[in-house]
Image (cartoon, coloured by chain):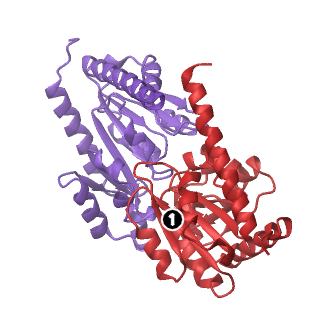
Chain colours: A purple, B red
Amino acid sequence: MPKRIRLEKRVVAESDRLAKELSDRFNRAGVFVANLMSSPGAGKTTLLEQTTRRLGAELRLAAIEGDLATDRDARRIRAVGIPCRQINTGGGCHLSARQILEAVAEFDLANLDVLFIENVGNLVCPAEFDLGEHRRVVVSSTPEGDDKPIKYPVAFHHADCVVLNKIDLLAATDFSLEAFRKYVKGLKPRIPILELSCRTGEGLDAWLDWVRTERRAVAAQAPRSAR
Amino acid sequence: MPKRIRLEKRVVAESDRLAKELSDRFNRAGVFVANLMSSPGAGKTTLLEQTTRRLGAELRLAAIEGDLATDRDARRIRAVGIPCRQINTGGGCHLSARQILEAVAEFDLANLDVLFIENVGNLVCPAEFDLGEHRRVVVSSTPEGDDKPIKYPVAFHHADCVVLNKIDLLAATDFSLEAFRKYVKGLKPRIPILELSCRTGEGLDAWLDWVRTERRAVAAQAPRSAR
């Protein structure tokens, strides 16, 4: 086997081992973990702000923010009142299981209900990396165009839920809801597509319900062994 | 030196060698080459459609379209009447010099004035890879938010021109032109920022002038040795 492939295999195996360690830790602590991916500027942070405002009194939330640079997102999330860790990747194009392991060391996981991981804004690379999460969410937005699912199929294919943000801008764009739904369902026939606007609040209730429901489903499958 | 670093160095050296080969080939043929980068859906293809409609009678244009999957962009560009090659990267998050070398083999470079390379929609990885281009263009768009330059500094730092697309959506978003300009200029004080809308046509003339001017500047520096 050439050296390059041998090396890649070793790196991938190590990454998978750390993801498994994270998954075990999340299950032991009984915390539901969702990994959010999107293009830059699709609205992941705004979605988390709105989620925190609406669910913060009901569930114990926390977030990990991944960015190349700046702590802007973490400051935005802390401002709405939940614990948040910023990971700056430097040039790195995705979050890694190792980075998440270091970040979660600063949380008391057993005292959390939901941990959101906001990945680096990139619709390509983060999809390849398991962070031990229970669910993956792809956030798309109407100004990006309705063809993103077929042009970036890997991210959508690995998703458990698609959030379509910025539906308040529908009339101002050429976006076809029908085409978008068809493309997503062509990749994953049964995936939920939650059409909403973080700006106006329209459609947010369905997203909050999705978080509640998936959290309960995960808790039912993996009861807290620490209890 | 550990194996991994040695290997990376070899891969980078090979990539640089191929980029140099491309650069030499572009200069010998006297074709001006611009490498366009952006987030998914910022409007690179629409910008090229509009450019082709307006410059196609004046300059001999061609394009290379990079995408993970589908030939949608290449079909859109061919529909406006210029030669176009689609590169599908599979999962690949950026175009490589090797892929460009293969693609340009199908063009008669000496009979072209301008070659546009539309990179994979990704504001992170393409910035790391030289494709032998004369100029780099980062296309940003108002719905993505005004903080993209500081959150994705590498792409902006390596750019020669920033196009801000979708200014027709300014009123419908929280985008601050002032903040965006400040962030870009903080990274590159003298870079041109071309604010336009591919949808309404507003501001496109300045972009066309930039293409004309940069093409002339490059031609003056590197006269066609093939002539």
Circle 1 — which element?
Answer: strand
Say which residue label 1 marks: B65
Q: What residue is rendered at 72% in x and 69% in y?
A: B29
> In the rendered view of the protein, which quadrant contains the N terminus of chain B?
top right
Q: What residue is rendered at 52% in x and 69% in y?
A: B45
* Count of residue discs: 1
Residue B141 in the figure: left or right of residue A225: right
Point out residue A133 in the picture as x, y percentages from the top left corner: 32, 31
Point out residue B205 in the picture as x, y percentages from the top left corner: 70, 79
> In the rendered view of the protein, which quadrant contains the C terminus of chain B?
bottom right
Q: Chain of mark 1?
A: B
Point out residue A42 in the picture as x, y percentages from the top left corner: 45, 53
Quarter-wise, where is residue A141 in the image? bottom left
Point out residue B157 in the picture as x, y percentages from the top left corner: 70, 48
User: Front-most of B227 and B210?
Assistant: B227
The single residue placed furthest to the right in the displayed view is B220
The single residue placed furthest to the bottom in the displayed view is B57
Picture layout, residue B108 above or below residue B26: below
Q: What residue is rendered at 46% in x and 81% in y?
A: B79
Please say whether residue A53 is visible from this viewpoint: no
Please say whether residue B16 is visible from this viewpoint: yes
The single residue placed furthest to the top in the displayed view is A226
Picture layout, residue B130 above or below residue B169: above
- Residue type at tag 1: Glu
